[in-house]
Image (cartoon, grey):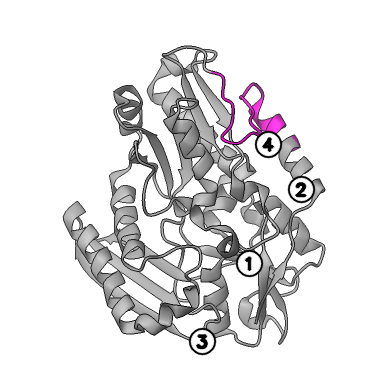
Amino acid sequence: MAGSLTMQTSREAAEDRDWCEKMQGAAAYAWGVPGGEGVRRGDEDIEDGTRGSPLALAQAYLTRQLLQTNYPELKEDGALDIVVIKTTGDKILGQPLSDIGGKGLFTKEIDEALLDGRIDIAVHSMKDVPTYLAEGSILPCNLPREDTRDVFISPVASSLGELPEGAVVGSASLRRQAQILHKYPHLKVENFRGNVQSRIRKLQEGVCSATLLAYAGLKRLDLTDKATAILSYEEMLPAVAQGAIGIACREGDDSAAAYLASLNHEDTRLAVVCERAFLTALDGSCRTPIAGYARKEDGKLVFDGLVASPDGSKVFKTSRSGEWSEESVLRLGREAGEELKAEAGPEFFTWLQ
């Protein structure tokens, strides 16, 4: 059974802002301003755009650290600034993502700032990036991927299987909701949005009995001690591109592209290419429970994917293996998606209308 928990509070907004102010110091701010208002200091300076959540900022600061390590001149004051941009998805927390427009909600304003020159690079969680890129932008860089698994967090049970009948699991992810209900139909799942810290706090306050989060996010925020258990891939297949950070720049900006090329992790990029090809073939969005995980094993591609009905009553799975090359991963990801789309049949997707 799926429902909804309203998650947005003025307290959470204040907590986010206070946390960001402590973390960012002199970073440019854009809270509440559509698309942000980064202040450029010169043609050679780099403005690094990001969402304002603690996790997004941790990823932006990681990117800055890596760039400054490779290019010491970027350590100079003002050479590489972080610009916080509040997206539509950050502003509307009381509704499921599937009701308010899908994944572009977390990237649209950042893309606009990139294309009109207010920022020069944009740091994204790849699972938030639509299968298409904004015209005029490119995404030439993926950082090394973090652990892709999900974690179970609960003050009352050590696993999903230990939760009693009717227990509420909070999650905004249709992918997680569907897989939970498929294996544990006696549980209830309800929409549970907010940043990582606020969700953990609300769990401790008894809003629900358990929640699931990406292990990668907990690692980047140094919150792994909050995890009750790390879920196996058999129990919870991850989201497409989970644990991967992508960095975009403007098409034709050779300087930014050169900086980013030095950070690109090719194995991560190829895994993400495969998974996004799978998602594209399924016409996937935040209204579709889809999971996909590609990795390199013994020099070869191994891929597992699934698509499910929102209530978890139907789940279709597939696996692939093949060569670890751009052409191969793109083809195998696409074929996996086409297979599941055909197996499920057109009527399976009518609930999206």
Instruction: Write down the residue under mark 1.
Output: 171
Q: As shown in the figure, which amino acid type bears the numbered disc 2? A: Glu
**Residue 325 visible in image:** no
Outermost residue toward the front in this view: 353
The residue at the point 34 percent across, 83 percent down is 345
Residue 313: image tag: 3
**Residue 321 visible in image:** yes
Q: Nearer the viewer, mark 1 or mark 4?
A: 4
Q: Nearer the viewer, mark 4 or mark 2?
A: 4
Callout 3: helix, strand or loop? loop
Question: In 3D space, how far apart are the residues under numbered discs 3 and 2 (Cα atoms)?
Answer: 35 Å
Above/below status of 56 relative to 189: above
Whichever of callouts 2 and 1 sits on the residue coming sooner in the sequence is 2
Residue 47: image tag: none
Whichever of callouts 4 and 3 sits on the residue coming sooner in the sequence is 4
Instruction: Write down the residue under mark 2.
Output: 12
Classify residue 3 by image quadrant: bottom right
Classify residue 211 by image quadrant: bottom right
Quadrant of the rendering where the N terminus is positioned: bottom right
Callout 4: helix, strand or loop? loop
Residue 8, position as x, y percentages in the image? 74, 54
Q: As shown in the figure, which amino acid type bears the numbered disc 1? A: Ser
